[in-house]
Image (tube, grey):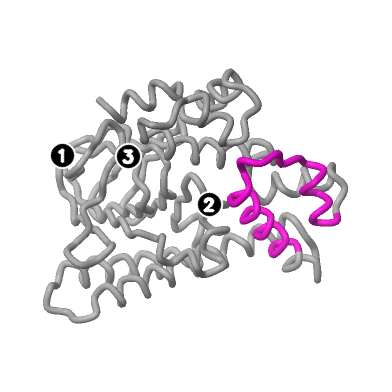
Amino acid sequence: MIETLNGIYETVNYKLSTSIKLYDNDEYEDYPPHWHTTMEIIMPTENIYTVGCNNQTFVLRENDIILICPCCIHTLFAPPHGRRIIFQPDTTSLRFMKDIEPLINILAPLIIISPEEFPTIHGRIRDLLTEIKEEYLNAAFSFSEVMIYSRLLEIMTLIGRNYTHHTEIRIGEGSRQQEYVEKFLEICDYIEAHCSEDLTLDAMADMCGFSKYYFSRIFRRFAKVSFYRYVNQKRIARAAELLIKPENTVTDIALNCGFSSLSSFIRMFKIIKGCTPTDFRNMYRS
C-alpha cells in the first residue's frame, strides 16, 4: 500500500489531478514506521486493524475511526483477513480557514472516534467516510474532489464541535465556556506560528489575561499535555521536516527550532520521536 517510501518518509501518490488518496485495503501486510505531510483517516470495515503511534498501540474494531494528524510517525499492523478504508487527504489547501490549523494542532497526534467515546457523531462520520470511498472509487462521477473535500470538512466540523463541547465542560462554566475555547484555539495557533521563538508560560498567560498557574492548569485540560510539552511537540515536528533536507545541519536545526543547546534538542527529540535526530535522518536516507 505504501507506494513511495524514502526511509520513513512516505510520498503520497495522489489520484490523478487531485490532492487525495484512498485505499479500500484488504492486504495482509504490516507497514513500518513512517510519516507523511497528509492527514490519514482509517476505518476498519471487516475485522480489526492495529495502529502504533506516539509510543502507544491502538486496536481498532470494525467501524472505529482513527484520525492521524500530519507529520506523525505511525505503524500499521493488519490481521490475516480484513478490510479497511485508508484515506489520505492533503489539508494544506484548507488551512486558510482559521479553524482548521488550531483544530489539527489540538488533535495531534491523533484522535479515535468510537461509538462509546463519541456517540453523537460516530455514526455520521462513519457514513461520510463510506460516501467518500464510494465517490473516490467511482470514476464516472464529476466534481468528485469537491464532494470529497466537502465531506472531509463536515468530518472536521463534527470533530471540532464535539471536541470543544467536551473541552468547554472541563475548562469553563456558563458564559465563559466559549470565551475560553476561543482563547485557547488562538493560543495553539500562535504557538504553531512562533514555536521557534522563546515562548514562556508567563507571556502566554498574559496574552490570555490569566495568572500563569491558572493558565497552566487550564491549558493542560484543553490540550491534554502541559504547555511546555505542547511547545516542544511543535518544535520537534518542525525539526523533523527540516531534517529530511541534507543541507541543514543538526546544530542549525536545533537553534532554528527554538532549542538553546544541541543536547536539549537531542534529548527532547528522542523523548517525542523515540530516536535521535541523526537516527531519524539516517532512517529517511536509508
Which is nearer the eye, 2 or 161?
2
Residue at horizontal 80 percent and vertical 63 percent from the top: 173
- What residue would you read off at disc 2? 107
Task: Quarter of the image for the N terminus: give it.
Answer: top left
Q: Position of residue 107 (x, y in %)?
A: 53, 52
The residue most toward the top is: 263
Element assignment for label 2? helix
Up the image or down, 215 lies above or below 52; here it is below
Mark 2 or mark 3, which is nearer the start of the sequence? Answer: 3
Range of magenta residues: 180-209
Q: Which mark is residue 50?
A: 3
Is residue 8 toward the left or the right of residue 30 in the image? right
Which comes before the other along the chain, label 3 or label 1?
1
Give the quarter of the figure containing the C terminus. Answer: top left
Where is mark 1, residue-wise?
A: 28
Q: CA distance from mark 3 to mark 2?
A: 19 Å
> Residue 227 location in percent, x, y?
69, 41
* Amino acid on which disc 1 is placed: Tyr
